[in-house]
Image (spheres, rainbow, N blue to C red):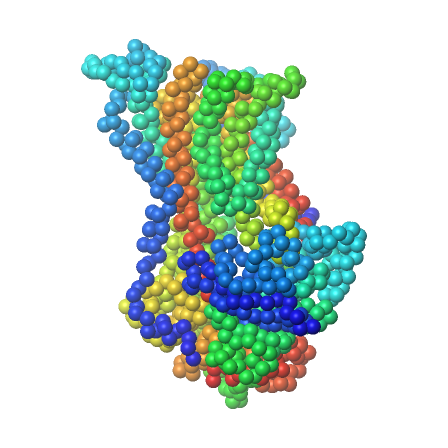
Amino acid sequence: MIRFLLQRLLATIPVLLVVAVVVFLLLRLTPGDPAAVIAGDIATTEQIEHIRESLGLNRPLVVQFGIWFGNVLQGDLGESFFFRKSVSELIAQRLEPTVALALCTIVLAVAVAVPLGVLAAWRHGGWLDRALMGFSTLGFSIPVFVLAYLLIWLVSLELGWLPVQGYQRLEEGFGPFIRHLILPSITLSVVYIALIARVTRAAVSEALTEDFVRTARAKGLPERRVLIRHALANAAVPIVTVIGIGLALLIGGVVVTESVYAIPGLGRLTVDAVLARDFPTIQGVILLFSVAYVLINLAIDLAYLALDPRIRY
Amino acid sequence: MTAPALRVEGLTVRLPPGADRPHAVAGVSLEVRQGELMCLVGESGSGKSIVAHTVMGLLPGDVRATAGRVLLGDEDLLHATPERLRRLRGEKMAMIFQEPMTALNPVMRCGAQIDELLAQHTALRPDERRVRVLRMLERVRLPDPAAIHAAYPHQLSGGQRQRIMIAMALILRPRLLIADEPTTALDVTTQAEILRLMHELQRESGTAVLFITHDFGVVAEIADRVSVLKVGELVEAGDAQAVLSRPRHPYTRMLLASVPALVPRKAPLPDGSAVQLRTRGLTKVFDGGGWFGRRRRVTAADAVEIDLLRGETLGIVGESGSGKSTVARLLAHLIEPSGGEIELDGERVARLRGNAARRFRRKVQIVFQDPYRSLNPRRTVGAAVAEGPLNFGAGRAAAWLRAGELMELVKLSPAVLQRYPHEFSGGQRQRICIARALAVDPEILIADEAVSALDVSVQADILKLLDEIQRRLRLTLLFITHDLRVAAQICNRVVVMRSGRVVEQGPVAEVFERPHDAYTRALIDAAPGRGFAFGEGSA
Amino acid sequence: MDTPLAEVATEAAVPAPAPRAAAWRRLLRNWSVRIGGALLLLLTLLSVLAPWLGTVDPTLIDPVNRDLLPGSRAAVVTLTGESFEHRFWMGSDSYGRDIYSRVLYGGRVSLVVGIAVALLSLFFGLIVGLTAGFLRRLDAVVMRVMDGLMAIPGILLAIALVALWRPSLPTVILAITVPEIPRVVRLTRALVLSIREEPYVEAAVSVGTSTFRLLYRHVLPNTVAPLIVQGTYICAFAILVEAILSFLGVGLSTDVPTWGNIMAEGRLQFTQYPHNVLFAGVFLALTVLAVNILGDGLRDTLDPRFSRESSNYGRGDRP
């Protein structure tokens, strides 16, 4: 078991390294002068020189990487010239809305998708199964922002049940906090639900064809127990895996969702930074999201220990 | 007690459209009395498993019983509600299956899996249930029941898992136990133990047992009565000893004649025959696990010394894990040895590369075990057979001509070259694989469990074919098998392997009748039905 | 002794239809393929034949025709001074441009991007994946790099790349292709590894087949189907990502209409004039849906797991 832990941890390090290198290189890939790009269109030559100095852009690439990486490990993600703040500060400010949205979405998605997938697998080929598959394809196809607008139009404009846009901080009251998050969470979760439900259905269907399910039925166990204790329990690993991998979709969707619903989170920050060509911020945000993704998937790998005894022993 | 526990009357089970016949079984009647063991025998596709699943009510959705009655005691199971069937299962009738490796839930402890059965059908308290489970584990002769109770299935061997299945099946003392090929996937020594166990338990508890098998040796070993199925129809039934010694239906007679006797038939080649292939200290070690993975070092072959004489048929016998397949693949140059040497006609060949390796390949060819996966499903049979000659420089026309000749050699029509593998049966595919191997004109042919996946009648045909080909083409044959009967039928000499080592070798008659090694003796003793003199096989 | 062989030898040798023809027929009989394919064809034709379907110049600005509701008629004055009556089927935007024309022309960009990204990512992914699957030494390194690339959420990477390289059709295509390549590599590698384990590949090796021939005769044909299925899904995803890029304002500039930037421009007036956003949105959703349905249908018919020969009753594995 310890070996498994170590193995997983060790496997993560090269991945994080590659992420760091790619993110680092992003800026250097631009045609033209990176310093000029960072400084923006209205910078003076002195400002550009100053930036070049402070980032060490005159030094060899490997040295630059070393400096940058060292800074990152200490929490220093550079300065944003556009916002005139340190990137770390910017991120810290915008963190809460994004995390809140993400958590709401994940909880909603798992709570809806897994039971639906199990039911569809149980009634394989029935109307629920087909309806779910149809919904799943639809969910993958409707772009997040189109869905967002549809929902806003329907629920906020026509029916007036929920606020159109905006975000309320948690300190200012739980009620408004949730009310502002409902539509965005639903919008964002649709794609996630489509993915998880599909995989759940496939995994549980597969498990139901396994020999040990036949044994369980031969023992005269009620179908409910067979479904949950035998089929679902063995489908847990692929389901949990896809919850982890699907986070990538979630992160991508966050950017758009925050944009449409005017939520001041990291997604909005990314868009603003891109429009302003503020590379330190872009790098910082991408680095943060990628590292978070890798670490969450690592945690999920570790969850396998609890789910599959074959890994433990 | 001769009241029938199970009575099947005129059972007909319909298959979904698109199957190769409309009914899985038609008009089948049989009876299993309390306290007796009835064997249901047939080849693959005979429908014997379907009968078993019908009784238990475990048929897949689109397969249905359309006529007849299935009486468990006085109750017709075909008219029972799903809920009633569910209650009967486990308590009044139980079933154990063929593959112990996949029949248990991998994420649940073994004890818990037996316990849930008790929890479902009885009103016992948890501590009472635990006592009962432990006692049952003892009855199936599992060492250290407490540890097994807490263990997960993957921590146990195949034989142990099958014992757990038996424990689960018998713990509620059902009237009827159905066993669907429970020992087919086990090693022969393990099989012997499990058969013995089942026989004992049956005698003790008086359960009626319906035992499904394709192996007449098993029938000879444990059956009280036997029923024979052919393509969904019952052709013969009766007392086991009577049917085995005086079969009346031609099909039964044919099947029995196809079972190779355990009596060795061939003498070894005369002394002084040339050694064609020789291994010296041949070793293969497999290293599993990554940097921090489980350090799994498996010594599959350990200093193996074998001589293969020109023109002989040498058998390598052993159970799973004995290393016999590894040796076969080493000799076929599919893997490289970790140590030792192989000499072909005096030349060192173990570590050849490139063109030298290809030249070697022409001389030594191999036929694999699984006829269903040995041919690329997307290429025609002709392309598969012609591939060898094409690789070695033959022109297209010449290669296909050769393929046609080879088809005739293996008793298939050359016209089938245009067809695809899925259009052929297992036996036919194996013939095609033999043709493919012969296409490059080898001197040595290795058959790696080449008949193990085939029905006994088809097996007899293939063995006969191999014999003929060997004589005609003057091949040397290296035959890998776990089945001692097959070895007895066609080998001149035999090598017995265990855990990567050669434990005994010599002329087949000597090894079988006067074995030196204890393991060899155990292996021969374990062969089911050895007390019964089976037919000559195909002479 | 009667054996099945006797029948085979005497049977008239009518060659059975090759799997390829059978596969085509099965493909065309599948409902998902039919519906998805038909819908996609329709949408493609609409975009390709746009000039002849009652459209005007999609970039023609005319403040006089601002914010017309769908279905209105108005006079359009072209750059050359011609004037004619035109029905604005989907209304006009805040610059007076005909949304119907913009939506139809916008489809071109989406389709080009979708197909280009799919083809490019399959091409590069296949090459890298085959290499990783066959050359053990490179495998570990390549897979680590791919894992790293996959750790960066695709849209973010695409956004960053487009920001770097300045938006234009080639850069957008490239920016969306890069994050997709690792997935194709992973799929190809997995396929290669599993095919290499098959006994028939071993058998081919034992009759002297060289590695190159092995790849060509045995490995590649078995990778084609799953890759085609994957390709359709990539196409759908690429269309979505391009729309997102445009919507966020980081994609192609607005003088080339794309569904994404039509929606981006219309978002400010969404509450008053939803038609700006909704028409483009519906077309986008329908196109992606069509491609996804087509992909599902292809998967059901082409994926080896589904198209394996139906379990014969007398297969010989002792039922």
At 74% from the left edge and 62% from the top edge, which residue is drawn?
B137
How many numbered badges does the structure rendering display? 0
User: In the image, what residue occupies the spot 57% across and 23% down?
Assistant: A181
Q: Is residue A88 visible?
A: no
Residue B364 is left or right of residue A183, and the answer is left
Locate residue C147 relative to residue A70 in the image: left or right. left
Above or below, comparing residue B250 to residue B288 in the picture: below
Residue B512, x across and y down, in percent = 61, 83
Q: Quadrant of residue A84?
A: top right
Q: Image quadrant of residue B289?
A: bottom right
Q: At 34% across and 33% down in the image, what residue appears? A: C111
Q: Is residue B92 left or right of residue B25?
A: right
Image spot of residue C144 (x, y percent): 53, 44
Q: Which of the two residues, B382 or A42, is positioned nearer the viewer here?
A: B382
Q: Is residue C129 above or below residue A112?
A: below
Residue B127 is situated, as x and y percent measured from the top left of the image, at: 80, 52
Q: Residue at x 49, y 68 (%)?
A: B27
**Residue at the farthest front position:** B74
Q: Position of residue B370 (x, y in %)?
A: 49, 66
Whether residue B435 is visible to the viewer of this picture, yes or no, is yes
In this rendering, is residue C70 above or below C292? above
